[in-house]
């Protein structure tokens, strides 16, 4: 793996973005966005992105809404949801429809996330 895999993490909490970047920047090229709209813009600028992890609860557009939009233009990307809450019907539907591949609970478990990402690379 000469070139690092690009991974986008979307979360409206800046602290979570920093923690994620610190934990994964050695293994992946990390992009971060504070909103779904910013995430969509970053994907357009970085079309080689292979993995997207999005927080579920964000102002304006939630994680599933963001992923539905992103998947239209970037069907090759593997999408994951991160939530501080129990699985919702919306997340369950997204899993069943193969919109997302997995959901992670907050606080995030770095090992679980890394293992899940590596399954797709």
Image (cartoon, rainbow, N blue to C red):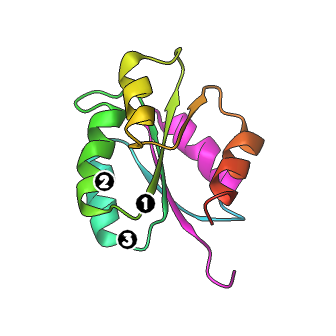
Q: Position of residue 11 (x, y in %)?
A: 44, 38
Residue at 44 percent of width and 42 percent of height: 100
Of residue 99 and residue 17, the one placed in the foreground of this image is 99
Q: Position of residue 14 (x, y in %)?
A: 48, 38
On screen, residue 8 versus residue 45, left or right, reads right
Q: Is residue 113 above or below residue 71?
A: above
Disc 3 target residue? 46
Residue at 33 percent of width and 52 percent of height: 39
Closest to the camera, between mark 2 and mark 3, is 2
Closest to the camera, between mark 1 and mark 3, is 1
Q: Is residue 57 visible?
A: no
* Whole-number angstrom distance, CA of label 1 to CA of label 3: 12 Å
- Is residue 18 rendered magenta in the image? yes
Disc 1 target residue? 77
Do tag 2 and tag 3 residues touch (Cβ < 8 Å)? no
Q: Is residue 6 visible?
A: yes
* Whole-number angstrom distance, CA of label 2 to CA of label 3: 14 Å
State which region is magenta: 1-24
Q: Count all numbered tags in the image, as a single digit.
A: 3
Sequence-earlier tag: 2 or 3: 3
Q: Position of residue 69 (x, y in %)?
A: 23, 48
* Whole-number angstrom distance, CA of label 2 to CA of label 1: 7 Å
Of residue 54 and residue 77, the one placed in the foreground of this image is 77
Disc 2 target residue? 71
Residue at 28 percent of width and 27 percent of height: 59
Q: Residues within 10 Å of mark 1 (few under 14, many from 20)?
A: many
């Amino acid at each position: 793996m000469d070139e690092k895999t690009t991974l986008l993490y979307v979360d409206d909490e800046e602290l979570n973005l920093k923690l994620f970047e610190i934990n994964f920047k050695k293994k992946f090229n990390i992009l971060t966005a504070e909103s779904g709209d910013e995430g969509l813009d970053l994907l357009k600028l970085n079309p080689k992105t292979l993995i997207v992890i999005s927080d579920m609860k964000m102002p304006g557009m939630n994680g599933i809404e963001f992923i539905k939009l992103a998947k239209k233009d970037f069907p090759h990307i593997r999408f994951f949801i991160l939530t501080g809450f129990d699985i919702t019907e919306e997340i369950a539907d997204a899993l069943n429809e193969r919109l997302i591949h997995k959901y992670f609970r907050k606080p995030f478990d770095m090992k679980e996330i890394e293992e899940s990402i590596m399954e797709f690379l």
